[in-house]
Amino acid sequence: MRAVFITASLGFGGAERHSITLTNRLAERGHECHAVYVKDDPGQLERLRGAASVRCLHANRYLDAGAVKALGLFFRQVRPSVVVAANPYSMLYAFLAMRRSDATVATGMEIDDVLAGLRFRY
């Protein structure tokens, strides 16, 4: 599986911490995981050990068209099978960037379904 985990930032919050943990654990099990964060706050960047790549979109305002475009280009390059959005803000960016992509978006509430499909025990 090729997954992209997208968060608003890598600041010290629960959604960010869970996304980092899932990225690391899935990568340990052989999945290709990428991390993307919208705002430039790399507070927990050092905890990301298993990501195939880490990308900051450097959004300058709440909805930054340049950041959406950069994310869309990243999706076309990586071709993820699933995109996991940690919160509604990151889901907005994922939805707008994926309009022409074949990836599936999973919200934080659907992550259990994604993990169940992987037979992942946490």
Image (cartoon, rainbow, N blue to C red):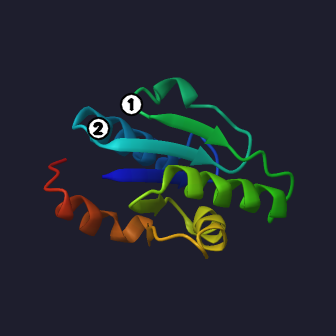
Q: Picture quarter containing residue 27?
A: top left
Residue 106 visible? The answer is no
Res 6 visible: yes
Q: At 48% across and 43% down in the image, what residue appears?
A: 34
76 sits left or right of 117 in the view: right
Q: Residue at x 54, y 70 (%)?
A: 101
Which mark, by number, is residue 7? none
- In the rendered structure, which amino acid carries the disc numbered 2? Arg
Q: Is residue 32 above or below residue 50?
A: below
Extreme front residue here?
77
Rendered image: mark on residue 50 = 1
Badge 1 amino acid: Gly
Residue under pointer 2: 25
Q: Position of residue 106 (x, y in %)?
A: 42, 69
Instruction: Identify the residue at the far right of this view.
Output: 60
Q: Tag 2's secondary structure? A: helix
- 90, above or below 12, in the image: below
Return the x and y of residue 87 as percentages of the image width and height: 54, 63
Determine contact: label 1, label 2, CB under 8 Å: yes
Secondary structure found at label 1: loop
Residue 19 point in image, percent of width and height: 44, 47
> Relative to the observer, which residue lies in front, 94 or 19?
94
